[in-house]
Amino acid sequence: MNIIPVCSKHFEFDNTYSRLPERFYARLDPTPVPQPNLIKVNRLLASHLGLDLDFLKTPAGTNILVGNQVPEGAEPLAMAYAGHQFGGWVPQLGDGRAVLIGEVIGSDGRRHDIHLKGAGRTPFSRGGDGRAWIGPVLREYILCEAMAALSIPTTRALAVVTTGETLIRESRLPGAVLARVASSHIRVGTFQYFSARQDIDALRLLSDYVIDRHYPEARQSPNVYLALLEGVIARQANLIANWMGVGFIHGVMNTDNMSIAGETIDYGPCAFMDTYHPEMVFSSIDQMGRYAYGNQPKIAHWNLSCFASSILPLIDENVEVAVEAVTDKLNRFPEQYYNIRDLKFASKIGFLNHQDNGADLVQELLDCMVTNKVDFTLAFRRLCDLSSRKGSENNSPDEPFTLLFEDCLAAEGWLVKWRERLVQEGQNELDRQKIMRATNPAYIPRNHRVEQVISAALGDDFKPFYKLLDILAQPYDDQPKSIEFQNPPLPDEIVRETFCGT
Ligand code: AMP
Ligand code: MG
């Protein structure tokens, strides 16, 4: 493949993962595609990474974003990892359809991976073609950018380029490449890969690398690797609590899809739920509901125990001592998670001083939402606008909220208790509403909207994609011109199942 000398202002690579030993990855270039066509480049993210937007839009820039040319300074590689998939151990996975092209430092001084998903076969591809069709690529772009706008840790999307290739899936579908940005692509499964091989040197190198890159504060602790575990646990507790707060269901929380840096990664058959139910599952491959909405904290805990057991030999030479130390840290996960989750839901119902976190009221509301099949996002958003005082009988300011419930009286009953407690809180009404509106998004990437974008894209119309991205960039704003995008799907628009699309 041609290495094109690209002026350094375009991509200033500073690669570190490629300095790790060769058994961490396979070096290879992305496989070229016949007809690259740039669909979207993320202007703000490009600027954050110091990339020249005008250049990225040229054929030369697009060729880099799709993997047809390797820019100077890039050192493309596919990362090795293993993982538990639906609880079953798979000793070798790895980047089967993605290539890490290098690392760049953002304007915040942080290091980011630039990674091309759908970049062709690698030694880790097993039976797959190494490609991605446009559906999952647009889905990941929309969902990860929505997640970022919601201020939830996530990988980001830099660009989408269609390839001109037709892929064989359930039908013939157009191919695309997603240029993805992450604070790194190291996973719990990366540690498991070396642990399973009893490669302690590699485990130590990887852990030191991760500490330097993501958890430098761990160096202050007497046992740096135990401090690493503590850091990873804390970030996962925060991440999952954030997901729960917006009704996000990842769908494939396998250990290879859990980022060690605590970002949402590998958007597959994920979904934001419309109607609230703790057992909600969308993924077509999740037959047993292992990764249902309400199971996510438990699964994160389980995945963290996989991480802990893979670094045991680094914690202490004496296995019993090591097990006791990590068990102590792991046992604190539920409390850490619930602390963040409860604060989040307290803010969602407007309890701001947190002496009373309103946990009983939150639970009562959620139970009532299940019984009455209520839209999660809309209910919390409409609650923001309700006054802490009841309106008069002949005007019903509560209706936008209560009419969401099949049994309005149940909702009214809950509001009575909510108001009593708000009085005890003694918050200024405007402050409360402001914080509630900054906690309860008006806009989420609703599944039916994402499906509409993908259908239009299959007819070469990307306007709905651009429009949805614009709306989701300001999820907490009212955006009166786009109000219909707040609405749940009509009965014939409901999406009940989502697919990996691999
Ligand atoms: P996922 O659950 O989507 O993160 O993928 C699980 C594993 O399957 C990873 O190792 C992927 O690289 C691999 N994989 C998924 N799709 C493909 C594909 N089309 N070709 C090759 N490998 C794939
Ligand atoms: Mg994955």
Image: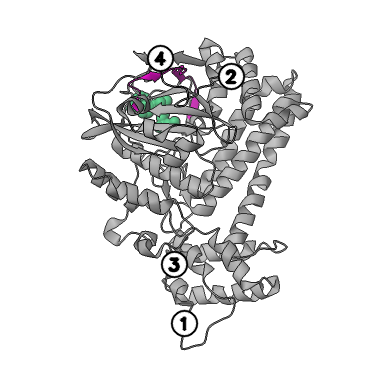
In this rendering, which labeled residue sits more in front, label 2 or label 4? Answer: 4
In this rendering, which labeled residue sits more in front, label 1 or label 4? Answer: 4
Amino acid type, residue under disc 1 in the picture: Ser
Label 1 SS: loop
Separation of marks 3 and 2 at Cα, in angstroms: 48 Å
Separation of marks 2 and 1 at Cα, in angstroms: 62 Å
> Mark 2 or mark 3, which is nearer the start of the sequence?
2
Tell me the residue that label 3 is attached to. 372
Label 3 SS: loop
Tell me the residue that label 4 is attached to. 28
Tell me the residue that label 2 is attached to. 195
Residue 496: which disc? none
Task: Check contact, mark 3 vs mark 2: CB within 8 A.
Answer: no
Label 2 SS: helix
* Viewer-side residue, 374 vs 85: 374
Tell me the residue that label 1 is attached to. 396
Q: How is the image coloured?
A: one colour
> Mark 4 or mark 1, which is nearer the start of the sequence?
4
Where residue 36 sits: x, y (%)?
Answer: 27, 28
Amino acid type, residue under disc 4 in the picture: Leu
In this rendering, which labeled residue sits more in front, label 3 or label 4? Answer: 4
Task: Check contact, mark 2 vs mark 1: CB within 8 A.
Answer: no
Q: Residues within 10 Å of mark 4 (few under 14, many from 20)?
A: some
Amino acid type, residue under disc 3 in the picture: Asn
In the image, is the residue at mark 4 within 8 Å of ligand 1 by its beta carbon?
no
> Mark 1 or mark 3, which is nearer the start of the sequence?
3
Residue 444 shows in this picture: yes
> Mark 1 or mark 2, which is nearer the start of the sequence?
2
